[in-house]
Amino acid sequence: MPPQNESSVRVSLVCGFARSPKHPRRKIRGFFVAIAIDVLEPVARLGYVSKAVIYGIVGVLAILAALNRGGLFTDQSGALRMVLTRPYGRMLLLVLAIGLCGYAAWRLLDAVMDPDRHGTSPTGWVTRIGNAIRGCIYGALGLEAFRLLRGLRGSNRDQAELWTARIFDWPFGQYLIAIAGAIVVIYGGSQFVQAVWGEHGGKLDWSPIPSEFRPLLKKISRFGVAVRACLLVTLGVFLVRAALSHDPNQAAGPRESMLRLGSLFEGRWFLAFVAAGVIAYAVDQAIQARCRRIRPVL
């Protein structure tokens, strides 16, 4: 029997269900599985492109500010608002919104279905919960982009403080914040270790990139992931501090995490170093968009 490629298998799967009137639920499920295979991967890759654009804007503005060249320190929401003010900004913002929401859907399904086989070990659960948290964060960012497109004002208040204050009002909210902060710290620490030891990028297929560029791009990618991991650890630490002190003002969002991490050393050079790491992370996300192996989640 000759081998079948993925598209022929998909077509035979859907057509087989369509010809089976005794199983209408299978027919419907087969239709949606085919749609998921055809749609989820492209929008997930578009999501990586959206992240690359957003982090590129944040990093460039931050490094200009650190060098006193007229930039400013902002976060992902600020980057979306800046996109809206540029020529063709509404069109670009629409693309970013679709990409972010698609990326969020893929990450949430990835956390539940576990196509990468992270498993149920402690490390596996941390990775899967981290994927779910990322899905929620970027889903909220995508919805904010749609709000901006509708002419509604995005929130100018620090989102970390806002949500921390809300969750404090929930039953056991203080403990939930502490647990979330601890998970972010552990996840960020694991990402840093992987970047330092060169284990990051195991899910990448580098073949589309010319071999002469790969060593440099791998170093840039590892540097960006390491800096991003440090920002996550900083964010998680301040979430735990907010929980312990029951003070939502102690929570730090992406912008505050960058400023607090950059203030570890005197002078603005280290802040510029962190901003350069954010730009490197944008390069990593562009590489992920092209080279990431995305397995079907359904």
Image (cartoon, grey):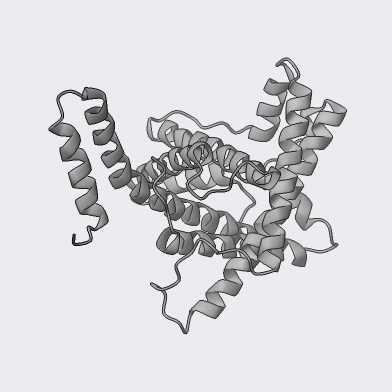
User: Going by the image, does 105 lie left or right of 78?
Assistant: left
Which residue corresponds to the image point at 51% horizontal and 50% vertical from the top-left?
116
Image quadrant assignment for residue 218:
bottom right
Residue 276 visible from this viewpoint: no
Rendering coords of residue 263 (x, y %): 81, 56
Q: Quadrant of the C terminus?
A: top left
Rendering coords of residue 235 (x, y %): 73, 44
Q: Looking at this view, is 227 or 154 the one in front?
A: 227
Which residue corresponds to the image point at 41% horizontal and 48% vertical from the top-left?
44
Farthest residue toward the bottom? 212
In the displayed structure, would residue 51 be above or below residue 249? Answer: below
Q: Looking at this view, is 133 or 202 the one in front?
A: 202
User: Going by the image, does 204 lie left or right of 93?
Assistant: right
Q: How many marks?
A: 0
Farthest residue toward the left? 19
Which residue corresponds to the image point at 58% horizontal and 61% vertical from the top-left?
281
Q: Looking at this view, is 28 or 264 the one in front?
A: 28
Q: Quadrant of the N terminus?
A: bottom left
Rendering coords of residue 72 (x, y %): 63, 53
In the displayed structure, would residue 113 be above or below residue 8? Answer: above
Residue 206 visible from this viewpoint: yes
Rendering coords of residue 155 (x, y %): 56, 31
In the displayed structure, would residue 117 be above or below residue 4? Answer: above
Which residue corresponds to the image point at 60% horizontal and 63% vertical from the top-left?
200
Farthest residue toward the front? 1
User: Going by the image, does 103 lie left or right of 42?
Assistant: right
